[in-house]
Amino acid sequence: MNPKRILQLIFIVLSAIFAAGSLVFAWFIVTFSTDEIIIDVGTLELDVVFFQANDDNLDGTLDGGYTEITGMPFTEILIPGQVYTFRITATNTGTVEGNLSLSIEDILMTDPLYESMITLDFLDPTTSAPVSENLTSGPYQIFDEYLMDAEEMLTFDFTLTVSTALTSSIASETITFSAFLIRLDQIAIT
């Protein structure tokens, strides 16, 4: 065998051993040199309570306090001129802020004349502007994307006022609120 060829083989073998040793050493260096990666995860949790104001004669002047509504369905007989006052408290019991939205999912009226007979009044928490609108059949978005901090509580008051123009011509008709949808959504980071 040619001595030049033997030297080439020895050089190739030593180069391969050195390269393999370098890769193994680099792998151990990378493996043992990384630090911990800690990701804190926040929570979104919402506690909601629904109340009706204590107003014995339903004139809009409260007699003191609110009573929690715990049973469903909730039913009232509407009489012209009456004012029904409600309160919803929503508390973000989570650890991060979120966007709070409130809507009535379905308003079902057995007579379309109701659409001009009931007024919803409230102070919009997102703009602080007073809102007064006639209720119509279908879903109704009360407010959307109210920024709610962790551990914050929102007290939202609203009234339903029955028009004095309501007559016996629509007696025995009904209005049904199928559900209030209260959502606290995670804020998208852009």
Image: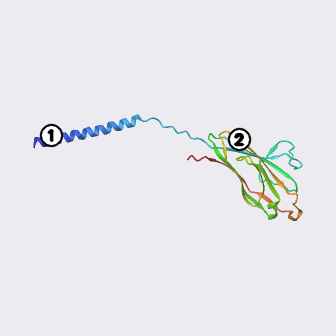
Q: Answer above or below: position of 112 versus 155.
A: below
**Cα–Cα gap, marks 2 and 1:** 82 Å
Residue 26 placement (x, y as % from top left):
34, 37
Query: Residue type at mark 1?
Result: Leu
Q: Mark 2 or mark 1, which is nearer to you?
A: 2
Q: Quadrant of residue 163?
A: bottom right
Q: Answer above or below: position of 131 versus 165.
A: above
Residue 29 placement (x, y as % from top left):
36, 35
Of label 2 and label 1, which has the lower sequence position? 1
Nearest the eye: 159 or 4: 159
Look at the image and tell me in which quarter the N terminus lies. Answer: top left
Q: Quadrant of residue 105?
A: bottom right
Nearest the eye: 13 or 96: 96
- For the image shown, how many numbered marks are present on the structure? 2
- Please rate how many residues cluster around mark 2, counting C-alpha atoms within 10 Å: few if below 14, some from 14 to 19, many from 20: some
Q: Quadrant of residue 166?
A: bottom right
Residue 66 left/right relative to 38: right
Q: In this figure, which residue is indicated by the disc labeled 1?
A: 7
- Any part of residue 107 in sight: yes
- Any part of residue 111 in sight: no
- Please rate how many residues cluster around mark 1, counting C-alpha atoms within 10 Å: few if below 14, some from 14 to 19, many from 20: few
SS at badge 2: strand
Q: Answer above or below: position of 72 versus 36.
A: below
Q: How is the image coloured?
A: rainbow
Identify the residue at horizontal 29%, vertical 37% (top origin).
21
Q: In this figure, which residue is indicated by the disc labeled 2?
A: 153
Residue 38 placement (x, y as % from top left):
51, 37
Check if mark 2's residue and mark 1's residue have beta carbons within 8 Å.
no
Q: Could you say which disc has been placed on residue 133 in the image?
A: none
Residue 125 placement (x, y as % from top left):
72, 46
Query: Residue type at mark 2?
Result: Met
